[in-house]
Image (spheres, rainbow, N blue to C red):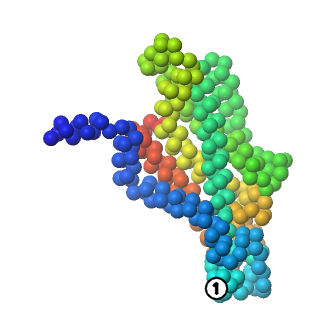
Amino acid sequence: MSSVVAAQAVARSPWQLAWARLRRDRVTIVSAAFIVLLFLFALAAPLVAHIAGHSADYQGVLTVDPKTGLPLGMGADGLPLGIGQGGYILGASDPNGHDMLVWLAYGARTSLFIGVVSTILVMILSLIAGLTAGYFGGWADNVISRFIDLIAAFPFLLFGIAASLVFGLGRISVVVGVIVFFSWFYPARIFRSEIIALREREFIEAARMVGASNWRIMRTHLLPHLVPATVVYASLSVAAAIGFEAAISYLGFGLSVDTPSWGYMINLAAGGGYYQLAPRLMFFPGTALFLTVLAFNLLGDGLRDALDPKGGVGA
């Protein structure tokens, strides 16, 4: 009986073993479930707007409370008119009369779009740089490594603000570009180190002896070994990108004022001190941002433990 169990254990692939470890990690499973629900919430933003009765750019200030400066009669004062009657389910998100729930949904769409797109570009650049520097070495390694040192010396947030001013405020492409420019070098360093450790292994030498080209060796024999690290850093990169977008939007140098963003919602709540009179203005977007970044970070930690229980990934 024990021999049968041992044979089954040997027959399991690394991905099956990783999935078995991942299923036992409740924190990672809960984080993944939250991320899935967040994506569904973002995709359903038009439906949320339809249920609420107005779009993301709708501004419906009827009467302003002289004490708080916030719209009255639409949920901001705790007396919603009701769904489909112009009422705000969670109240107004700012003095302009935007719907809190609608802006949370479209803000999730904005944050996830920036996080996912920038992460894809970061992973592509870091894999190319890491593979090239690690496999070829020599002058290619020196050029890429020195360029990485140069990029790492720049202050991330300060350059992001400067780039927003130079290339135009409110453009998602500028925010994504800044995130990619300052994020690719760290995983590239990790990939380079792993490739240096692998390039002299016996299976690489065997591939060279049978006439495999450098491109085929990198694509077929080396790149698969970077998949676990890539999955882990992709999850962490999404969290970092969402946090950066929220930071510069909070500072007023991010997306345009008509683009729903959790960071901009916090900016509006803090700018006029409205959060002191209506704490929910900061609570809802702040909690959404906190839980999202936390979920992606916990997912990354769980994936790292599942894919490499010995701690090799990212070491």
Q: 209 or 32, which lies in front?
A: 209
* 257 sits to left or right of 298: right
Which of the 4 image quadrants contains residue 251? bottom right
Residue at image point 48% right, 39% down = 228
Which of the 4 image quadrants contains residue 147? top right
Q: 208 or 315, which lies in front?
A: 208
Residue at which label 1 appears? 82
Question: Please, is residue 191 above or below residue 91 in the view?
Answer: above
Type of amino acid at the residue the image marks with label 1: Gly
Residue 40 in the image, given as x and y percentages of width and height = 56, 62
Residue 192 in the image, given as x and y percentages of width and height = 56, 29
Residue 296 in the image, given as x and y percentages of width and height = 53, 53
Question: Please, is residue 294 above or below residue 20 in the view?
Answer: below
Q: 223 or 65, which lies in front?
A: 223
From where the camera sits, is residue 278 visible? no
Residue most toward the left?
1
Total numbered circles: 1
* 37 sits to left or right of 266: left
Question: Please, is residue 208 above or below residue 112 in the view?
Answer: above
Residue 160 in the image, given as x and y percentages of width and height = 75, 48
Element under disc 1 = loop
The quadrant the N terminus occupies is top left
Residue at image point 69% right, 54% down = 245
* 229 sits to left or right of 75: left
Residue at image point 61% right, 62% down = 42
Question: Please, is residue 286 above or below residue 202 in the view?
Answer: below
From where the camera sits, is residue 248 visible? yes
Which of the 4 image quadrants contains residue 247? bottom right
Residue at image point 48% right, 13% down = 210
Q: Residues within 10 Å of mark 1 (few under 14, many from 20)?
A: some
